[in-house]
């Protein structure tokens, strides 16, 4: 007998990432080839027509796993019975907008959406926030869903940063991306993030640091490449994509969101991945902040678990602490506005 459909809510479904996401979800890329899905698409009124257009095309794909689609501008309708929610729609930074304005505008979106999730989502709901500033938006949504939904059901996306880091290493080391394990993105999904290879390894048994040292002709050259090329390139890859395409990352962002949910639901396989999760104080991160750390999932319904207790060198620790300080500042700015 076919299993009951999983209700997947996508916000910002009429936008670019939404358009790239919906077809892959409906094709079974996110939950596997035997789990039917029911899509609930949330848009603001101006975006509803675009979501309707995507729904017409979804119908034209006749995906066997796609049970039905509902499009709405009402969060209570969109999150009703949601098992999985991908919060993609957000307010972009407009001309002349200060950081505090951006945080406030998004708190005005993610607060009510979190409250709606708390009120009507399924008991097993899991939420990933993609819309920026993703970590702090997730913090606000989690706070607004409490006490009805445990905070650890909320995560934010840093899988795109993780995949970008793996892609850079694969290119330099001339190995397939699938042979690189245990890269970590620490901190905020922003330019302060710390992409860390100090625990990463290759399928041939070498550490990534050994392989970089061999490839670049010495440990100093490897360190210089990490500091001067790798870390800034990963952290600023979004801007590089905008410069090249004239538009921000879309397919790669949708792919990362699919992989984030897939691994959380079905399990990570070789090694760990990166996700921003609600801190319980691991690595000295203040409790409640949504911070990117290494995680694994067993695919047992318990979601991501933090790999705790890894070491940093002094420079790595300083980078991580700077990114955590930025998360604290974002949280405090939202608090000062009375929105948290
Ligand atoms: P688009 O502007 O194409 O789409 C956003 C959609 O959200 C629009 O259709 C808009 O109508 C809708 N929307 C706005 N407010 C809404 C609300 N209150 N409820 C429901 N829908 C709402 O942006 P897109 O390129 O799809 O990017 C979406 C978000 O992802 C942005 O915030 C972007 O910054 C963020 N990103 C996050 C990434 C990550 O790794 N965490 C990477 C990619 C991307 O930059």
Image: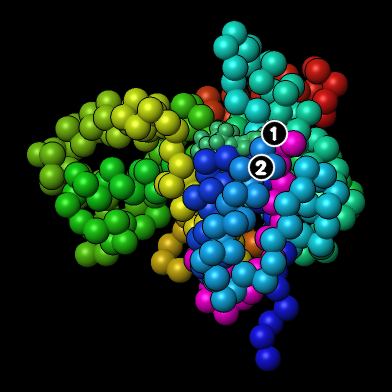
Nearer to us in this view, 317 or 173:
173
Nearer to us in this view, 45 or 225:
45
Specify the segment rendered in magenta: 29-46
Judge whether 312 appears above or below 183 on screen. Answer: above
Q: How is the image coloured?
A: rainbow
Residue at image coords 60%, 49%: 53
Q: Is mark 1 within 8 Å of ligand 1?
A: yes
Residue 76 visible to the viewer = yes
- Residue 113 placement (x, y as % from top left): 79, 42
Nearer to us in this view, 213 or 172:
172
Question: How many residues crowd mark 1 within 10 Å: few (<14), some (14–19), many (20+)?
Answer: few
- Residue behind mark 1: 46
- Give the residue furthest to the top: 96
**Left or right: residue 236 compared with residue 49:** left
- Residue 160 placement (x, y as % from top left): 45, 45
Residue 138 visible to the viewer = no
Split into quadrants, the picture shows ligand 1 in the one at top right
Judge whether 302 appears above or below 237 on screen. Answer: below
- Give the residue furthest to the bottom: 1
Image quadrant containing the C terminus:
top right
Residue at image coords 51%, 29%: 190
Question: How many residues crowd mark 2 within 10 Å: few (<14), some (14–19), many (20+)?
Answer: some
- Residue behind mark 2: 49
- Residue 328 placement (x, y as % from top left): 66, 26
What's the CA distance linking mark 1 and mark 2?
A: 7 Å
Q: Are marks 1 and 2 in contact (CB under 8 Å)?
A: yes
Callout 1: helix, strand or loop? helix
Callout 2: helix, strand or loop? helix
**Figure quadrant of residue 246:** top left
């Amino acid at each position: 007998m076919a299993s009951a459909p999983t209700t997947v809510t996508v916000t910002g479904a009429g936008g670019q990432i939404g358009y790239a996401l919906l077809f892959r979800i409906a094709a079974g890329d996110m939950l596997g080839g035997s789990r039917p899905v029911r899509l609930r698409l949330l848009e603001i009124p101006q975006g509803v027509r675009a979501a309707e257009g995507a729904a017409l095309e979804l119908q034209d794909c006749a995906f066997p796993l796609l049970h039905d689609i509902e499009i709405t501008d009402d969060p209570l309708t969109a999150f009703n019975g949601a098992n999985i929610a991908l919060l993609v729609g957000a307010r972009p930074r407009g001309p002349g907008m200060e950081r505090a304005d951006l945080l406030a505008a998004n708190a005005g979106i993610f607060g009510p959406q979190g409250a709606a999730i708390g009120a009507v989502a399924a008991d097993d709901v899991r939420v990933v926030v993609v819309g920026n500033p993703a970590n702090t938006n997730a913090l606000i949504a989690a706070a607004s869903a409490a006490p009805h939904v445990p905070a650890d059901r909320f995560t934010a996306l840093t899988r795109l940063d993780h995949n970008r880091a793996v892609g850079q290493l694969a290119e330099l080391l001339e190995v397939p991306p699938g042979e690189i394990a245990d890269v970590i993105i620490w901190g905020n999904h922003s330019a302060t993030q710390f992409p860390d290879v100090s625990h990463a390894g290759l399928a041939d048994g070498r550490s990534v640091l050994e392989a970089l040292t061999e490839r670049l002709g010495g440990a100093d050259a490897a360190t210089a490449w990490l500091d001067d090329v790798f870390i800034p390139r990963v952290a600023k890859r979004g801007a590089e994509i905008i410069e090249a395409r004239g538009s921000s990352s879309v397919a790669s962002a949708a792919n990362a969101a699919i992989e984030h949910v897939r691994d959380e639901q079905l399990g990570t396989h070789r090694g760990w991945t990166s996700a921003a999760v609600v801190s319980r104080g691991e690595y000295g991160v203040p409790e409640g902040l949504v911070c990117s750390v290494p995680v694994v999932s067993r695919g047992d319904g318990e979601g991501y678990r933090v790999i705790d207790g890894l070491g940093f060198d002094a420079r790595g620790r300083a980078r991580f602490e700077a990114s955590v300080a930025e998360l604290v500042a974002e949280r405090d700015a939202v608090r000062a506005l009375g929105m948290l």
